[in-house]
Image (cartoon, grey):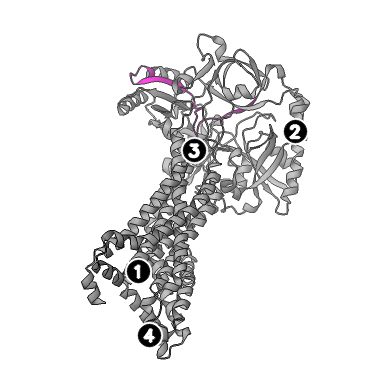
Amino acid sequence: MFRNHLKIAWRSLKKDKLFAAIKIGGFAVGIAACLLIALFIRNEVGYDQHYANKDQMYRVVLEGMYKGEVMKSTHFQLPFADALQSDFPEIVKAGKVNTTGIFGAGKRGIRLADESQNNLEDGFLLADQETFEILEVKLEQGNPNTALANPKSIVISESKAAKYFKNETIIGETIILDNDASKPYTVTGVMKDAPKNSHLEYDFLIPIEDTNASWTNQNYFTYVLVDPNTNVQQLEKKMVSIVEDYIIPAQRERGRAPDFIDVLRTMEYKLQPITDIHLYSDIKMADGLKHGDIRFVWLFAAIAGFVLLLAVINFINLSTAKSANRAKEVGLRKTIGAYKSNLVVQFMTESILFSFVSFILGVLLAWALLPAFNTIASKTIEMPWAIWWFIPVVLLFALLVGTLAGLYPAFYLSAFKPVNVLKGSLSIGSKSGKLRSGLVIFQFTTSVILIIATLIIYQQMDFILQKELGYDKEQVVILEGTGVLGNSAENFKEQLLQLPQVKAATISNYLPVDGGSRNGNTFRREDEGNEGRGIPAQIWRVDYDYIKTLGITLNAGRDFSKQFASDSLNSIIINTNMQRELGLDNAVGKEINNNGQMFKVIGVVDDFHFKSLKEDISSLSLVIGKDLGSISLKLEKGNVNQALESIQTLWNKNVPNQSINYSFLDQEFSRMHDDVERMGKIFNSFALFAILVACLGLFALSAFMVEQRKKEISIRLVLGAPFKSIYKLLTLDFMKLILVSIIIAVPIGWYMMTRWLEDFAYHITIGCGIFLVAGLIAFTIAILTISYQSVGAALIQPLKSLRKE
C-alpha cells in the first residue's frame, strides 16, 4: 500500500511541474537558510566550550558606581590574582593575562636568532604560569608546569613553529622580538593552536615581566578556577574583602579623602563564566576583545524560524488552493470505497515526499552557499558531514516538517463530500480563501519588517562611516611594526617628511581605532590634591606632530612645541569632555593631578571619537612620550600608489630585514564596526531569503488564480473588457493584502529597530521616509511577482481558451 501511495505522490509531483517546483524550491530555500543560521548559532554558542573544566572557570569583573552610573571593568592590579588565590580557599588557581600593546602584547616583530629577516606577527599574549594552567594550554613539546616560569621564555603555537623552524624539536631555540638582540627569548614550549572559537586569540605566550605591585594600577585580566563545590554567589560576596584589605589601605596611604574611600566601597566583584564571555559581555567592560551578541543569536534563530514557517505556509497555501484539481480524484476514490484514512495517508505521503526532496536540495544548497556565508560572517564554519547525528537529525526534521506541513491539506482535501464534488457544486478552494489571505498577510508583514530593518541597518552603517569624528581619517597611512626602528625612529620620520607626498608624520601607537595602545588613569584638579574622587581618563603618549597629523582641532591654548622644554616633562593637552568632567570652565594654565604627578594643561582639543560609536566620547589626555609601535603619515591628495612606493623605498633602506606592513586609518575605523556591518550583511542575506520565499508563494497563488478564472477572463475579453480592467481584476485583491501587511509591519518594525539603535551612543533618527520606501519596495516586489501571470492572462486568446473549456 505504501508503495502505491508513493507512486501516486510521484505522479502528482510530475503532473504539476510549476507548482511542484515552487513548493520544493520554497522549501529548499527555507531549509538552506535555516541550516546556515543553525550552523552559525552552533558556532557562536560553542565559544569556550572546549575546556574540560569550563564549569569551574571564570573571569573576574569589577562593578561599581560612578556619578550615578554602573561602571564595569575587567582590568585588575598585578597582585590581585595572587591575593585571590591566597585569601579564598574556594579558588584553586588564579592567573592574569595582558592583551594591551603597552606591555608587549598584540603585534610584534619576530625573527630567529640566526636570521636577519623580521616578520610582523599578531597574537602575542602576556600570561603567568597559573593562567597557562587555567586555560588548559596543551603542549606538544615542553614542560607545562614550567613553560612560563622564567622571564624571557616563550611558548609558540604549532602553526607558527612550523612556519619558523625546520626541525621538529625546537625547545631551547632562540627568538628575537622587535629586533632587540640584547633581550633574546628562549622557546620553552610548543602548544596546540588555540581553538578558533575561543574568546582569547593567541599564537605566542610570554611571561609577565611587570614588577609594579601597586594596588592602584589596573592592567590585567584575571581568571580563576574554583572548586567544583563552590557557591559562586557566596564567593562573590566574600571577594569584596579585597577592597577593605588591600585597595583601601593602599589609597589611604596615598592620602585619599573619605569620600573617595566611600566610592571604593561601592565596588563589587562578579565572576563571569568563561563560556559567557563571547556572547554576554557588556560593552561597558571595554575589554578590547572581539565579541558576539546573544541578541543577534536569538534574532537569527527567529529569522530561521520565520523563513521555514513561510516555506510551510507556501506549502499549505498551494495545497489548499489546488484543491479543485484534486476534488474529483477525492470524490471518485471515496465513491469506489476509499476511506478518509486512506486519503489522509495518501496526502501525508505526498507532503513527506515533498519534504524529503526539499531537504536534500536545501542541504546541498546550504553546502554550496557556505563558502560565501563564511566570507560574509568572517567564520570558518564547515558542513558537519562527519558528525554522527547530522544526517539522522536532517532526516528526522524532514519527516517532522513534512508531517506538520501536510496535516492541514491532508484533512482538508480528504473531507470533500463525493456527491458535491461529482455534481460540480464544490466551491473551488473558496472555503480556505480567508485562511490563504491571512497567510499572505503574515508572509508579507514579515517581509516588510525585514525590509524596514535592512534599510535602517544600511542607514546606520552609512551614518557611522560618514560621521564627523573630530579627526581626519582620510589619506592617513599607518606603518605598523615600527618598534624595530628603535632609536632611529625619529630619523626615519624626518626622512619620510622629505617626501613630497607626505604632509605630516607622527610616531605613536596610541591611535583612535581598535588595536591602538590604551592607558587608563585617574585625574583630579590641583585643589583636590589626592582627596577628590577623580575622573577616569585615557593618557596617551604622543609626539609633537600628533595633533597636526590627525587633524584634531585645538579650541583653546596651544599645541606641543619643542621650543618649550617643559612640554616633554609635565605639559598635557586634554579633550573638552575631560575639561568638563574636571569641573573647569577654562582648563588652560591649570594643573591637574595624575596619581601624584602634576601636569600643566597647555591646550584643550575638541572631543574626537577614539572608540566605537556604540560608546560615548570619554575623557582623554595627551602627553609627550615615546611609543614606537607605529608611525602615521598624512599624505597629500593625489597618487597614493606612488606615495606608497616612495615610502617602501625608504623603509627598505632603513629596515632591510623586515617587510613593510601598513594600513589606512579610515579602513581601521571601519574595522571597529565590523561586527555591526557583518551582522547587517548576514541579516540582509537571510531577509532576502525570506522575501524570496514569500514571493514564490505569491507567484504561485497568482498563477493559480489566473488558472481558475481563465474562463471568466475570456468572457470579459470577448465582451470588450480592456487590458486595464483585467489587470486590475487580478491584482487589486493582492494589493489590498499587501497594504494591510504594511500597516501591521510599520509599528512592529519601528519598535524593533528603535530598540536596536539604542545600542549606539550615536545613531540615526528613524523618519517616515524609511517606512514609505519599505512600503514602496514591498508593493513593487508584489506587483512584479503578480504581473507576470496577470499580464499573460490579459493577453490570452479568448476564443481559444473558451474552446478548451
Tell me where residue 231 appears, x and y as whole percent: 74, 51
Residue that sits furthest to the top in the current view:
563
Residue on which disc 3 sits: 764
Residues at badges 4 and 1 in contact (C-beta under 8 Å)? Answer: no
Residues at badges 2 and 4 in contact (C-beta under 8 Å)? Answer: no
Residue 97 visible in the current orientation: no
Tell me where residue 352 appears, x and y as whole percent: 43, 74
* Amino acid at pointer 4: Leu
Residue on which disc 4 sits: 422
Residues at badges 3 and 2 in contact (C-beta under 8 Å)? Answer: no
2 or 4: mark nearer the eye: 4
Mark found first going from the N terminus, 4 or 1 = 4
* Region of the chain picked out in magenta, as a range: 496-522
Question: Which quadrant does the C terminus fall into?
Answer: bottom left
Residue on which disc 1 sits: 704
Mark found first going from the N terminus, 1 or 3 = 1
* Residue closest to the eye, 614 or 190: 614
Q: Is label 2 in a helix, a strand or a loop? A: helix
Tell me where residue 45 appears, x and y as whole percent: 55, 53
* Amino acid at pointer 2: Tyr
**How much space separates mark 1 and mark 3, taking CA atoms?**
43 Å
**How much space separates mark 4 and mark 1, taking CA atoms?**
22 Å
Residue on which disc 2 sits: 246
3 or 4: mark nearer the eye: 4
Q: Is label 3 in a helix, a strand or a loop? A: loop
Magenta region includes residue 520: yes
* Residue closest to the eye, 492 or 66: 66
